Image (cartoon, rainbow, N blue to C red):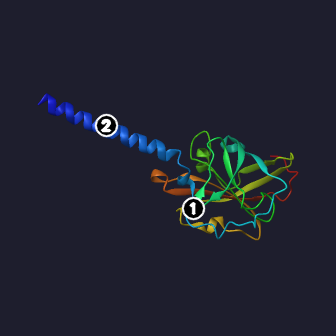
Amino acid sequence: MTRLISNLLMIVGSSFLIISAFFLWERVNPERLKFENVEEFLNNGGQEKSIRPVFLEIKDLKINLPIYEAEIIKGRWQATTKGISYLSSSGIPGEVGNSILYSHNWSSLLGPLTKAKPGQKIIITFDNGRKEKFVVEHTQEVGPDNTEILSQTEDSRLTLYTCSGFLDTKRFVVSAFPVKDQDETF
């Protein structure tokens, strides 16, 4: 009987280790951040960008992170664990179009983003030192098949998102727009 209990505990323990390893792997898997079938929405024609966003700050949420360029290569979304990924095929923040930034839902990355509220301020700093200020207009939680939020736009828009929901099956999305008076202090 003790041998049976011992074997049973070994099986249960091994199962927990395997499940834990799977969830750890999924936590850092860049595929968790992707949206389905978006290549048609995100194409800047391969244009070289003269300026690049390099830093994002949301004081109310205590988010201060570097920004790294990322691409979608053969349907795979690049993602960094060091900061925020900027989808280089999307618009430049502050210019006409939809600028897409995303990162993992970790407390050291965009985990606090799920507490964002309309009216909060976002500052993007560029490699030339210029700063662009944005205000959160709305937030929403969507499924990975809701690609409309990634569509290019006629206005100037910043779209930030991170994983959310049970087992990161949803995306928490923040839409922000430039502040009309860029001299306004934040």
Q: Is residue 76 or residue 104 the one in the foreground?
A: 76
Q: CA distance from mark 2 to mark 1?
A: 33 Å
Amino acid carrying label 1: it is Phe
Which residue appears at 31% of the width and 37% of the height?
14
18 lies above or below 174? above
Report the side of 131 relative to 175 (left or right): right
- State the SS at label 1: loop
Q: Badge 2 local density, few (<14 within 10 Å), some, or many (20+)?
A: few
**Which residue position is annotated with label 2?**
14
Picture disc at residue 35: 1
Q: Amino acid at mark 2?
A: Ser
Q: Nearer the viewer, residue 19 or 59?
A: 19
Reading the chain from its start, which is encountered first: label 2 or label 1? 2
Residue 103, numbered circle: none
Residue closest to the eye, 21 or 124: 21
Quarter of the image containing the N terminus?
top left
Place residue 23 in its image quadrant: top left
The residue that appears at 53% across and 45% down in the rendered structure is: 28
- Percent from the top left, x then y, of residue 147? 59, 67
Q: Position of residue 153 (x, y in %)?
A: 73, 69
- At x 71%, y 61%, the residue is 89
SS category of the residue bearing label 2: helix
